[in-house]
């Protein structure tokens, strides 16, 4: 490393700040062996492997106790694990001692999260690997000399996969994610998967900002030619990255946003797309973003150094890239208050309609009881069953540590004030189940439905009310065959459809009654109802 680089100290630990090109050069020189196996691919993207942990280790996340947020965190959720502050101080000092004795300095990146600087947080990100530093530069926003963040709080993040936890800390051996609100520190130990960095920061923002009156959302966002903002809420694999990367609209971001008094802003500076099945034909914006500066996780590489965006051994192939890699991006990384909100549901049971419009009460029901069926890979330990239902509050329960009313109350207030149209869209199957004779909705079909809603083509159409599901569906969507809109009509065996519908409704009600019984009855009444007969 040349002598003109800026060295810093974090409690006597040597650090170095490098630009993207130098980080790439270091990665391809020193990180080609071991777990990482970094490879230069055609068009300049770097392929890396993340070892045994190819998804999030959400069961190894801990909140350091003793902060002003303790009383607001929902400790009844098993993912919200407390960790005693004095013990964390020992872990932190051991992590720094480990870094101090390492043969190379940590890489330091000066970044921030939150494009609206009224609600941003500065980040000092220290990484053991150069590729993690590139990932951080992609996913957060680079702090420039002219950037005015005012009195923004500053967080320190240390990501060191080579620092392994031991049982004397009172945790399982190996890995851990620690979020310390009092010391404004995040420690990632023993994990290579890049997504841990962005989701730990997202979790921090989802704790602090709602208590300041700002709604944080696990969603994508884009803006139309006339300035209309749309949000796309979905769990991993539901389609938010794909559907927000729309050549006819301007991307704000694909995953993490703040809805504040000024409108919607992206928390991040880049995108983190699922790579499985991406092609130039199906998703050109994402496919064309895979070039110099992009990081591709867990993909195989051809003899011609082309990343294969499918790995039969690993479900979670991911691509990280800066927003500048997308052709149409929204200047300023923010937009106005949303006019349309889409809840995207990957329904592999083939029960839900292609699209339905939700009342404010129904929107709150489906926000709380955010349903999907799981795709492979994002969370470690996730089974690969074709059909396995999941309910995850806010379309990302693992990232929302506060009691759920903090988020639902803010959403209720935002919907009442700004009156967006809210839609439930099935990005999954119709005509049967995924493990039966069902067919997944074509991407072109879902895009046409989204555009019809955005363009106002569904505002005045005649609707049909589906009693059991308690949903209103349009009788016609321009450009879509009418028989695709009513889910029961798409099934050859109507009795089998009704049985599957009753099964899914039962899952909905079981989840709601167990978790959200203290929501108003008007919200529960806006959800589905068992019919009691087939």
Image (cartoon, rainbow, N blue to C red):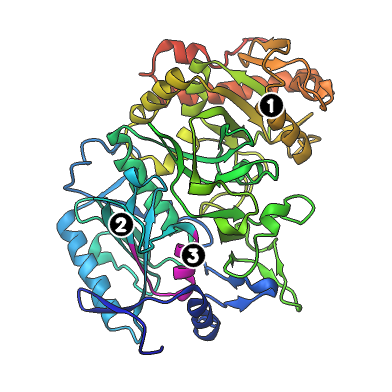
Mark 3 or mark 1: whose residue is earlier in sequence: 3
Q: Relative to residue 223, is residue 270 depicted above or below? A: below
305 vs 438: above or below: below
Residue 403: x %, y % from top left: 32, 32
Mark toward the start of the polypeptide (1 vs 2): 2
- Residue for badge 2: 178
Residue 360 appears at what percent x and percent y? 50, 17
Q: Quadrant of residue 248?
A: top right
Disc 2 element: strand
Foreground mark, 2 or 3, reads: 3
The residue identified by callout 1 is: 455
Crowding near the residue tagged with mark 3, few <14, some 14–19, many ≥20 C-alpha atoms within 10 Å: many
Query: Which quadrant: the C terminus?
Result: top right
Q: Is residue 132 magenta?
A: yes
Q: What are the residue bounds of the magenta stretch?
A: 124-138
Q: Return the residue at label 3.
A: 135
């Amino acid at each position: 490393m040349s002598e003109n680089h800026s060295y810093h100290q974090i409690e006597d630990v040597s650090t170095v700040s490098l630009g993207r090109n130098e980080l790439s050069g270091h990665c391809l020189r020193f990180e080609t062996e071991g777990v990482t196996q970094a490879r230069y691919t055609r068009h300049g993207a770097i392929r890396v492997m993340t070892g045994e942990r190819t998804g999030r280790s959400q069961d190894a996340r801990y909140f350091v106790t003793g902060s002003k947020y303790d009383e607001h965190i929902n400790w009844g959720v098993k993912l919200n694990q407390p960790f005693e502050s004095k013990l964390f101080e020992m872990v932190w000092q051991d992590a720094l001692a480990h870094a101090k004795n390492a043969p190379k300095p940590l890489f330091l990146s000066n970044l921030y999260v939150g494009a609206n600087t009224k609600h941003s947080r500065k980040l000092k990100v220290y990484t053991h690997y150069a590729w993690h530093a590139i990932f951080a530069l992609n996913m957060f926003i680079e702090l420039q000399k002219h950037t005015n963040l005012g009195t923004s709080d500053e967080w320190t993040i240390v990501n060191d996969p080579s620092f392994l936890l031991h049982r004397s800390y009172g945790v399982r051996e190996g890995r851990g994610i620690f979020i310390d609100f009092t010391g404004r520190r995040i420690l990632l130990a023993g994990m290579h998967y890049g997504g841990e960095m962005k989701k730990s920061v997202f979790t921090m923002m989802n704790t602090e900002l709602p208590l300041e009156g700002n709604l944080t959302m696990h969603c994508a966002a884009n803006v139309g030619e006339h300035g209309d903002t749309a949000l796309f809420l979905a769990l991993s694999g539901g389609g938010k990255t794909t559907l927000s990367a729309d050549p006819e609209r301007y991307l704000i971001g694909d995953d993490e946003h703040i809805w504040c008094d000024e409108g919607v802003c992206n928390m991040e500076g880049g995108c983190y797309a699922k790579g499985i099945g991406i092609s130039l034909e199906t998703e050109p914006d994402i496919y064309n973003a895979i070039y110099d500066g992009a990081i591709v996780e867990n993909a195989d590489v051809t003899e011609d150094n082309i990343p294969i965006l499918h790995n039969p051994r690993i479900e979670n192939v991911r691509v990280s890239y800066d927003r500048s890699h997308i052709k149409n991006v929204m200047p300023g990384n923010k937009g106005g208050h949303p006019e349309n909100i889409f809840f995207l549901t990957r329904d592999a049971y083939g029960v839900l309609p292609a699209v339905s419009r939700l009342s404010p009460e129904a929107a709150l029901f489906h926000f709380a009881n955010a349903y999907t069926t799981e795709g492979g890979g994002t969370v470690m330990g996730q089974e690969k069953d074709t059909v396995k239902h999941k309910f995850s509050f806010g379309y990302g329960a693992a990232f929302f540590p506060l009691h759920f009313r903090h988020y639902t109350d803010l959403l209720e207030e935002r919907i009442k004030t700004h009156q967006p149209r809210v839609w439930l869209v099935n990005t999954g199957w119709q005509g049967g189940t995924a493990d039966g004779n069902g067919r997944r909705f074509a991407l072109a079909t879902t895009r046409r439905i989204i555009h019809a809603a955005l363009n106002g083509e569904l505002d005045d159409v005649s609707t049909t009310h589906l009693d059991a599901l308690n949903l209103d569906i349009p009788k016609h969507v321009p450009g879509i065959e009418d028989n695709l809109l009513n889910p029961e009509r798409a099934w050859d065996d109507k009795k089998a459809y009704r049985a599957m519908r009753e099964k899914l409704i039962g899952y909905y009600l079981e989840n709601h009654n167990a978790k959200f019984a203290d929501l108003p009855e008007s919200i529960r009444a806006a959800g589905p109802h068992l019919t009691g007969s087939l």
